[in-house]
Amino acid sequence: MDLKKDNVKRFKSVLYGALIGVLVGFFISIFRISIEFLSGILLKISMYANHNFLSLILLIAINLLFAIITYQLILSNSDIKGSGIPQVEGQLAGEIDYKWLPVFIKKFIGGVLSISSGLFLGREGPSIQLGATLAQGIAKITHKIGVDRKIMISGGAAAGLSAAFNAPIASTLFVLEEIYHNFSTLVWTVALSAAVASNFVSTAIFGKTPVLHMQYFHVIPLHIYPYLIGLGIFLGFFGKIYEFFTINIGKWYSKIKFLPQWIFSIIPFILVIPIEMFVPKVSGGGSTLVLMLASQSPAISALIFYFLLRFIFSTISYGTGTPGGIFLPMLSLGAILGALYAKILINFNLMPSYLFVNFIIVSMSAYFACISKSPFTAILLITEMVGSLQNLMALSFVTLVAYIVSDLMNSKPIYDEMLNNLLDPQKQSNLGELFTINYSVFVGCEIDGKMVKNISWPNDTILSSIDRNDKEIIPNGSTIIKAGDNLKLSTNYKNRGYVHSYMDKLVANG
């Protein structure tokens, strides 16, 4: 009977996921269309501004208007700031909560204005938060609370990323690897069904061509792999630099007391104007630039210029809190570094030139993985975005090397660090309702193989049940915790953040 109930519950979860996916796919597609439409208009005005003073004045006026509107939206609701992924992580960890409709509307408008203006920001972060927020609204309408609500929000996040990048498998894995750090059955069934349904909608609207589709005809041979080790080290080092600047830029802004904060919101909108006028392919999230690198193979001097420009302006854009993601900007920086490394090898006759595109592809995955600390998501994301499995071995190899290098340099997951920065000024909620949290037990973690009575559990928390092989176990002191168990803990709502941080250390395998 219990097994039948579980099967029915999973079936309902898939249906809920599909419903969420269709709705999120529709709204994120509108989000993408709005950005493409507005950015197309602004790029045309930028072209005229090169030789027409009135067009330049018009462009400045539009960008100033966008900056003022975006700044006012952020002032009215700080939950729309930046990428949106830290907010989703905080919400699912029980550390943040917000009203869904105001955030959805303001994030949508703010994201469209900031991204279409040419700022070096991606659509994927806002898409994830928009998807999660829309799913939160569906949960409210259908009266879902607690764990069911969190699972629906997870599905919305996966659907948002899937619609943004047409990458349903990587989107599902992103929720599991980056946000939950475990593979709960209910979470992945909802996330996968939502991601697939969302991808179906976006594919019907935008077509089947992968977002970063590149033409290449060779696989990296084994004798080139020693150079891939150097590439991984190279990317890991620059990934650490990117993490440092991106995490701290907001703090540096706040230390400049002699200028009002609204100035910092306007600066990127003004600085982007000459970039759009003279090097338009470098502006925006970075997908146009990545495809241009693959097709044109620029000179080393040009690649260094592209990297410095995008690195500096990406951090400036994001540091102001303007709604927009760093997902795609990270991938574009990885692509530039990979192209630069490949060019050096080619110039010294250490590698054939026909492998240039391959190095761009594997570098995007490795650079993203060492910054986000989500290697499996990175590998699958680039595979889906490029639309080919041919580079999978080399891609995995470089990603692993870069990940290890970033670990040795004590890099932290960038979205977790952003969440910590976000929570510093916030006071925890004083609500006291019962709150249930699920945790998966990883192989070799601190509590793997221990009796319940021998484990130091977080304060004011009860281990209410253990899900093991589709069976629910009511634990006692002598029950042994095993790898793969799904623990259900109950605590006060106000205690949820503390429990999440505490249990993360107990169940993780390091």
Image: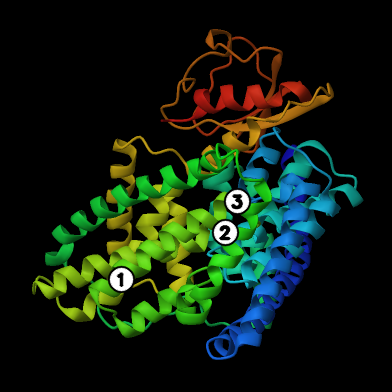
Q: Could you say which quadrant of the image residue 295 lies in? A: bottom left
Q: Residue furthest left?
A: 349
- Residue beneath the point at 29% across and 65% down: 338
Q: Estimate how packed mark 3 is, as few (under 14), some (14 to 19) or many (20 or more) residues with alpha carbons within 10 Å.
A: many
Please give left or right for residue 78 compared with residue 347 in the image. Answer: right
Measure the alpha-carbon separation of dots 3 and 1: 26 Å
Q: Estimate how packed mark 1 is, as few (under 14), some (14 to 19) or many (20 or more) residues with alpha carbons within 10 Å.
A: many
Could you tell me which secondary element the residue under label 3 belongs to?
loop
Between discs 2 and 1, the one toward the N terminus: 2
Measure the alpha-carbon separation of dots 3 and 2: 27 Å
Q: Amino acid at mark 2?
A: Ser
Question: Which one is in front, 489 or 304?
Answer: 304
Where residue 327 appears, x then y in whole percent?
A: 52, 58
Q: Is residue 191 visible?
A: no
Could you tell me which secondary element the residue under label 1 belongs to?
helix
| Residue of label 1 | 303
Q: Could you say which quadrant of the image residue 105 lies in? A: bottom right
Q: Estimate how packed mark 2 is, as few (under 14), some (14 to 19) or many (20 or more) residues with alpha carbons within 10 Å.
A: many
Where residue 231 appears, x then y in whole percent?
A: 23, 58
The numbered disc on residue 171 is 2
Could you tell me which secondary element the residue under label 2 belongs to?
helix
Between discs 3 and 2, the one toward the N terminus: 2
| Residue of label 3 | 320
User: In the rendered view of the protein, which quadrant contains the C terminus?
Assistant: top left
The numbered disc on residue 397 is none
Where residue 410 appears, x then y in whole percent?
A: 35, 34
Seen in the picture, residue 112 relative to 248 is either above or below; the reply is: below
